[in-house]
Image: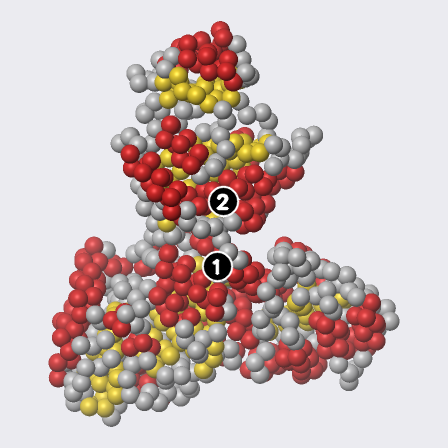
Amino acid sequence: MSANHSLAPLFHPASVAVVGASSDLRRLGGIPIRLMREHGFPGAIYPINPNRAEIAGLRCYPDVASLPEAPDLALFAAPRDAVLPALRQCAERGVKAAAVFTSGFGETGPGGAGLQEEMAGLCRAAGMRLLGPNCMGVIHTRSRLMATFTISIREGETLSPGPIALVTHSGALAACMISDLHDTGAGLSAMVSLGNEADVDFAECVDHFVDDPDTRVICGYLESVRDGRGLRRAAERALAAGKPIVLLKSGATEAGARAAMSHTAALATPHGVFTAFARQCGVTLCRSYQELMETAHFLSRAPRAPRPSPAKAGGGRRLGVLSFSGGGASLVADAAVEEGFSLPPLAEATRARLQAALPQYAALRNPVDLVSVMVSKPGQSPIAEAGAAVRDDPSVDAAVLVMGVYHHMADQVGRDFKRLFEESAKPFACCWMAPHRAALQAVRKAGVPVFEDYDRAVRALAAQAGFEEAAARAARPGPEIDLSRQKEARRLIGSAPRSPEGMLPPAACRALLGLYGIPQPAQAEATGADGAVAAWRKMGGPVALKAISQGLVHKTDAGGVVLGLDDEGSLREAAARLLALAPDAGLLVQRMAEGGVELLAGLSRDPAFGLCVTGGIGGIFVEVFGEAARRLPPFGEEEASAMLRGLRGAKLFEGVRGRPPVDLPAAARVLTRLSEMAAELEGALAELDINPLIVTPGGALAVDARVRAA
């Protein structure tokens, strides 16, 4: 990153100017001054207000031009019409970064968007970084920078430094997060509210915090992705650095996407594409605000689990469960299985330790029902002893302890949580349902993350396991770019004729699949019925006859496909009908693929992340399952297989209603070749659709393909 594009002046400025400063330290232009002074910001603070001589004991200046030095950072709390003139002065003085609190720009419509672009262009030309507009500013606790107007920092209090950085599209949610991280003792390393992202964006801030020594977990709220490739690079760096990213993302539904667009004037990335990115890069997507906060706290304090080995039974997802009740144990077990955990049987030595800690009537199995142990053994620490026994079991990778109520022994519960969490070298999640509030707050302040819902506790453990699994996958070598194949494929696409919509002719589509080793049925083109009959005789079995025409993109819908032809008369009759569909119609004779499972496979372009690979159940089951898995390229056959096995219709691959199992590895190889194609042909391809990809016990065949050039 060049010096001009460094975010250091935004997070570590030596001096700060406040344009539109207010003498009322409870207003937009006064809060940053009060907060920086209360937190002991060590640099110079320059209030700018032509109507004041001083504010809060600080000399006030009429404008940026009159400042004694060029500040590193300028904050804008001025009315919209005053922002651009002051920003020009900042550019002339050499200010390095600006954060614009003021709203009324891109989020309001074309007029505001024009002003925002003018502002962004001015900053680009001056080499000045721009945060916002319409943002809540920036915090860095160890730099004691409080360049924000948030009301979540109560007067007279200072924020607790901690290991969690916040990146958010919502200033209001940022205020909630700051307050919760402070109150729970989780602690904040930094916060950046992005607003309209005219310049500084989500991906760049995530990338910045990967290198921030004060940050262990990056937490955020995301509405849209402006730079998907940049976000992916940042997430991959975070994965390599061992820094989990935990996100709450809106826009999963059409209504949510509309709301996000009205907020920041940006389109939401399709949910399936973003979910694929998150899975591959070890990013945790939370379902609720509370889950976001509790998961970030847990991951910031929990020990890192060993990277799972593929050869290891359970692969790092073997969970030990302890619960204050049998009903709770059952619920936790269900949640664990849904998140991909197994509950292994406990070793004999573990059972012996449990027998010594628990009442005689306790069942010594996983999940462990603690029954009334706190009542039956007062003055002892049976929960801590039982928890340690399960945690230490060699067949257990992680553990969760769920308690409920026990207000009369709240201090003991808190001590047991603290002991188990601090002494554990494995991930250990503590949950307290219907807790004693003061005791819960005390144990959290002591550095122990405690969940209030068993499902969130299990999902946090799954988040840590998913992060380590993604890191292990990333450490393995992936497919490499084949430069000679890439050159030939680009030549093929560039030289092929195309329709006005960019569609390539069938021969070019088949040649492209062949270049990437994607199997296809025996086939031949013909100009008339005689050629079609000759091709059928050569193939020696039933064939499909398809019309070829530039105007027939969806051949089946136009009646341009006839299946199962195996006699000359039927073939000639079908040929005559298909040739009449279009003046330029030709024929494709294709050997029938027998039986098997029909899949959809292809490439599509996401505006943020580029080409992505799609695979799903096709044929008559499209309406039944209505789903498709997506991945970002490139990836190997292991990931492709996981992609297919994760489909709701994956049971079809095993054989149903007397049908034999099909060759799933062959289908995975096709998806892998598509991922290589996407990686090598970014910018040359807009989309590719194989429909159907027929998977049989003997392999996988791309029966029909459409390709649109970029």
Q: Is residue 351 above or below residue 662?
A: below
- The front one of 686 and 268 is 686
Q: Identify the mark at residue 438; answer none if there is no mark.
A: none
- State which quadrant residue 11 falls in: bottom left
Badge 1 crowding class, 10 Å Cα cut-off, few under 14, some 14 to 19, many 20 or more, is many
List x then y, in percent, for residue 635: 49, 50
Answer yes or no: is residue 583 visible. Answer: yes
Q: Quadrant of the N terminus?
A: bottom left
User: In which quadrant will I find the C terminus?
Assistant: top left
Rendered residue at 45%/55% (across/down): 277
Residue 403's place in the image compared with 343, above or below, is: below
**Image side of residue 585 versus residue 471, left or right:** left
Number of marks present in the image shown: 2
**Which of 635 and 610 lies nearest the eye of the viewer?**
635
- Alpha-carbon distance for marks 1 and 2? 18 Å
Rendering colour mode: secondary structure
> Would residue 50 be visible to someone looking at this image?
no
* Residue in front for this viewpoint, 60 or 492: 492
Callout 2 secondary element: helix
Q: Circle 1 is placed at which residue position?
A: 281
Residue 497, x across and y down, in percent = 28, 30
Closest to the camera, between mark 1 and mark 2, is 2
Residue with the most extreme bottom position? 57
Q: Of the two numbered discs 1 and 2 on the same chain, state the one appearing first in sequence.
A: 1
Residue at 39% across, 67% down:
207
Mark 2 — residue? 672
Quarter of the image for residue 356 reads bottom right
